[in-house]
């Protein structure tokens, strides 16, 4: 499952023993895979400031999750011709161990082996400063995402509009990709070539009558140059001064003169515009000709899938220099930006989760700071109800009223302003990596 439960309990002897009991029960019953979740010691500040940060972090958490889901969906849209490869482009860059900073890590591995990034978010600065850094980083990514996706959507719309012109029937579609210069009499003071749409059942009638529909029609000047399921597009050459009379007679015989005058410059411009838009759209994605290679590294009790960024000083086993140099070749600017900034936003989101656990644990368990955070990964959806019962039983002593209310939604907890079903005796936050659902 791509679902995680991030919980914490006080770090005293009694609760550490409770955590051990939880590990024993969940392991024997095959309910979840559990790992410690390391959170640094932050500067606590005042309790009033923590209450304010708790509210701010809740909003930032929701914003970050929404942002990475938008970015994941943008990757899907950009990779419309290779949707099967979307997931392998949604990775977190490094962040596990110092020696692995050059690696692309799958999201599950990043979460289960999370380490706080001290360089990017110094734990020694006040908590409000850390939160502000995260908020500004995500806001900038959102701003850039809006501008880049707007430009891409404009490109797609312009291309779709041009493509629509080349679809449809002969009455409405563009003719620039059908006609050629040789189909027309050009640069004549007296003669002009018209295009006439003739229903399929009337082909024989057209051939017999077109020369007599008006005076001054050039004999044997008609030619079928295109057709669809309803009819055909014929050329006919005649003298300019009889155009109106010919159109009237053609209409009476259910032949339709298509208003079109050959302009080589305009036709070439339209063709070039289509080619340019197709090229621009493709270049936004354009994946490498070398398939993404997968190496692997293993942590105790957990397998980590990795993909090298191409750092020659830290080669992955089984990868040649040529393969490493080819990684990322040919990626378009939008896809490349999405991959890099999805990683940045995802990493920031997990840091926000860590901050929420810290702040809520201090508010819940008090000072001095002493708690243990644990990450649980339920093995299957059907096990979540039983897992929740185990947690509520093991940590019932932390808040008897809250534990009882989980089973009885009618019990109200004084001082709480949210649904009782979202409150548990222990600190709890949910992480869902099903970003494409």
Image (cartoon, rainbow, N blue to C red):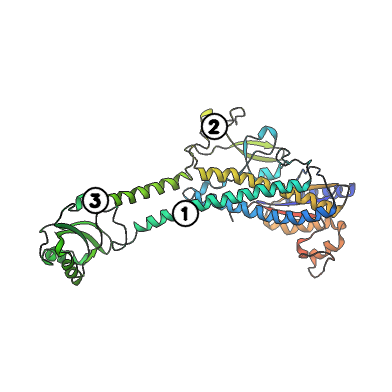
Of 198 and 174, the residue lying toward us: 174
Q: Earlier in the sequence, mark 1 or mark 2?
A: 1
User: Residue at label 2?
Assistant: 324
Tell whether 72 sits left or right of 209. right
| Residue depicted at 72% across the width and 42% down the height | 121
Of 268 and 170, the residue lying toward us: 268
Secondary structure state at the residue bearing disc 2: helix
User: Residue at label 1?
Assistant: 154
- Disc number lying in front (3 or 1): 1
Q: Earlier in the sequence, mark 3 or mark 1?
A: 1
Tell whether 413 sits left or right of 250. right
Instruction: Identify the residue at the far front of this view.
Output: 189
**Residue 48, percent from left and from top:** 83, 55
| Residue depicted at 69% across the width and 58% down the height | 382
Secondary structure state at the residue bearing disc 3: loop
User: Residue at label 3?
Assistant: 180
**Residue 188, percent from left and from top:** 16, 53
- Disc number lying in front (3 or 2): 3
């Amino acid at each position: 499952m791509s679902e995680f439960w991030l919980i914490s309990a006080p770090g005293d002897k009694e609760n550490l023993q409770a955590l051990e009991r939880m590990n024993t029960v969940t392991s024997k019953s095959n309910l979840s895979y559990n790992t410690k979740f390391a959170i640094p010691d932050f500067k606590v500040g005042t309790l009033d400031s923590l209450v304010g940060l708790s509210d701010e972090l809740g909003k930032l958490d929701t914003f970050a999750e929404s942002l990475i889901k938008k970015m994941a969906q943008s990757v899907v849209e950009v990779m419309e011709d290779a949707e099967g490869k979307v997931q392998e482009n949604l990775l977190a860059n490094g962040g596990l161990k110092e020696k692995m900073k050059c690696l692309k890590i799958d999201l599950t591995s990043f979460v289960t082996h999370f380490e706080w990034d001290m360089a990017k978010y110094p734990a020694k600065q006040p908590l409000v400063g850390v939160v502000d850094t995260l908020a500004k980083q995500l806001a900038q990514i959102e701003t850039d995402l809006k501008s880049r996706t707007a430009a891409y959507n404009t490109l797609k719309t312009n291309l779709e509009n041009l493509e629509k012109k080349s679809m449809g029937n002969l009455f409405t579609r563009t003719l620039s990709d059908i006609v050629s210069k040789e189909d027309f009499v050009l640069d004549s003071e007296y003669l002009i070539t018209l295009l006439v749409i003739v229903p399929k059942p009337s082909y024989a009638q057209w051939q017999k009558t077109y020369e007599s529909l008006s005076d001054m029609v050039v004999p044997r000047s008609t030619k079928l140059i295109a057709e669809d399921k309803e009819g055909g597009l014929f050329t006919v050459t005649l003298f300019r001064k009889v155009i109106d009379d010919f159109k009237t007679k053609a209409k009476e015989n259910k032949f339709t003169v298509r208003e079109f005058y050959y302009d080589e410059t305009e036709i070439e411009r339209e063709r070039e515009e289509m080619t340019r838009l197709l090229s621009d759209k493709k270049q936004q994605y354009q994946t490498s000709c070398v398939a993404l290679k997968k190496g692997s590294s293993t942590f105790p009790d957990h397998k980590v899938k990795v993909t090298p960024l191409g750092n020659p000083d830290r080669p992955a086993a089984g990868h040649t220099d040529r393969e490493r140099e080819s990684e990322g070749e040919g990626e378009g600017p939008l896809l490349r930006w999405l991959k890099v900034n999805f990683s940045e936003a995802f990493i920031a989101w997990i840091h926000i989760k860590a901050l929420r656990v810290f702040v809520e644990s201090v508010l819940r368990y008090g000072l001095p700071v002493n708690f243990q955070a644990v990450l649980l990964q339920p093995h299957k959806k059907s096990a979540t109800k039983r897992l929740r019962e185990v947690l509520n039983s093991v940590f019932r002593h932390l808040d008897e009223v809250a534990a009882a209310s989980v089973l009885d939604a009618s019990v109200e907890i004084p001082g709480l302003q949210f649904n009782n079903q979202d409150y548990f005796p222990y600190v709890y936050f949910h992480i869902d990596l099903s970003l494409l659902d």
